[in-house]
Amino acid sequence: MKVTRFYAPGDVRIEDAPEPQAGPGEVKIRVRNCSTCGTDLKIYRHGHHRIDPPRVLGHEIAGQIAEIGAGVAGWSEGDRVQVIAAIPCGQCADCRRGRMTVCPNQESMGYQFDGGFAEYMTVPAKVLAVNGLNRIPDGVGFGEASVAEPLACVLNGQELARIGEGDEVVVVGSGPIGCLHVRLARSRGAARVFLVELNRERLERAAALVAPDEAVCAEDGDVVEQILKLTDGRGADVAITAAASGKAQEQALRYAARRGRISFFGGLPQDAPTIACDSNLVHYRELTIVGANGSSPAHNARALDLIATGAVPVKDLITHRLPLDGALDALDVVSRGEAIKVTIEP
């Protein structure tokens, strides 16, 4: 079979590999869609300390069961399934407290285990042990199901930021994650959602799809001033920085409303991880700053339900579909910012 395998930064190869077999506690799936992520591009360019190459990439996975391993019950060949990306241990103190997104023993598809940029792959027993294999609901395509994983991460972030009825929400970053944040915030009852982006072309492309209440381009002037003007000086109830920008995080502190919540959803580069935080703003305005790291198995199952019910449409966000031998082209498209979501169809 064909796979897309990472060897070293800048060295990702499309090559032949033996077709895997399902071991005890595992299932083998025929991958139908594996969508790309900005993390895949980072790995391609810089590698990752948690990856011991060679490793098949891809962690936004949907497919059909092709083989059932010994000891696996409740599944049949042909079942349509979505696979979690982040695999908690299920046993540590954090997991037992329901905090699976911060499991210190977490492993991941495409990192410690071969991922979905392949024709076939095995789903590890550790995934099944934490209920990380989900049935794709009727009416949901494989491409849409592959987007459940990033939507699950967005769901985790919005739960932590407590987005709800009547909130005015700012989303910074108009990539696929930003688009999902806009749609999910709406489904959770946000009164208005503003989308902020530095690049006008990317902003216009995203806004045409997700129709924020206002598309705010940083090229048009100070973002803080624009948000305060849109909110009659009150500021935003919630700010989500879905971009790797320290400046965006600093600005969010300045346009957050009193008792506002700020989600540092996008991590910062390792060589520039610090920001200037006016502690008095946090103190006197009673602001809450939260992080957001990945998703739990339960988030993935709920994300699939949000897609199936139409609460959060995702099909139109998939702007590019490429075959497996076009995986490098897919990463190139992502790097140029020419797409919303790119999916591989092995």
Image (spheres, rainbow, N blue to C red):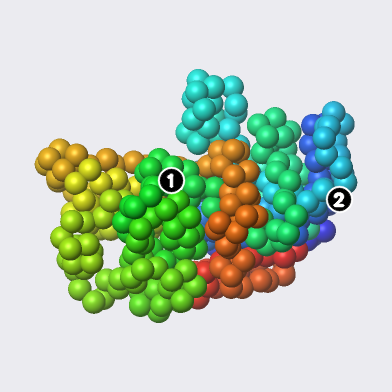
Q: Position of residue 57 (x, y in %)?
A: 64, 54
Which part of the image, by quadrant, shows the N terminus? bottom right
Please, is residue 103 above or below residue 337 in the view?
above
Which residue is painted at 55% across and 58% down in the image? 312
Which residue is painted at 28% across and 51% down in the image? 237
Whether residue 151 appears in this view of the structure is yes
Amino acid type for the residue under numbered disc 2:
Gly
Badge 2: how crowded within 10 Å, few (<14), some, or many (20+)? few
Name the image quarter holding residue 232.
bottom left
Amino acid type for the residue under numbered disc 1:
Gly
Judged left or right of residue 8, residue 28 is: right
**Marks 2 & 1, CB-CB < 8 Å contact:** no
Q: Which mark is residue 57?
A: none
Which residue is painted at 66% across and 38% down in the image? 132
Badge 1: how crowded within 10 Å, few (<14), some, or many (20+)? many
Please, is residue 159 above or below residue 91 in the view?
below
Q: Position of residue 206 (x, y in %)?
A: 45, 72
Q: Which residue is mark 1?
A: 157
Which part of the image, by quadrant, shows the C terminus? bottom right
Q: Which residue is mark 2?
A: 78
Please, is residue 181 above or below residue 287 in the view?
below
Disc 1, SS? helix
**Alpha carbon separation for disc pair 2 and 1:** 33 Å
Task: Say which of 96 and 189 sits in front.
Answer: 189
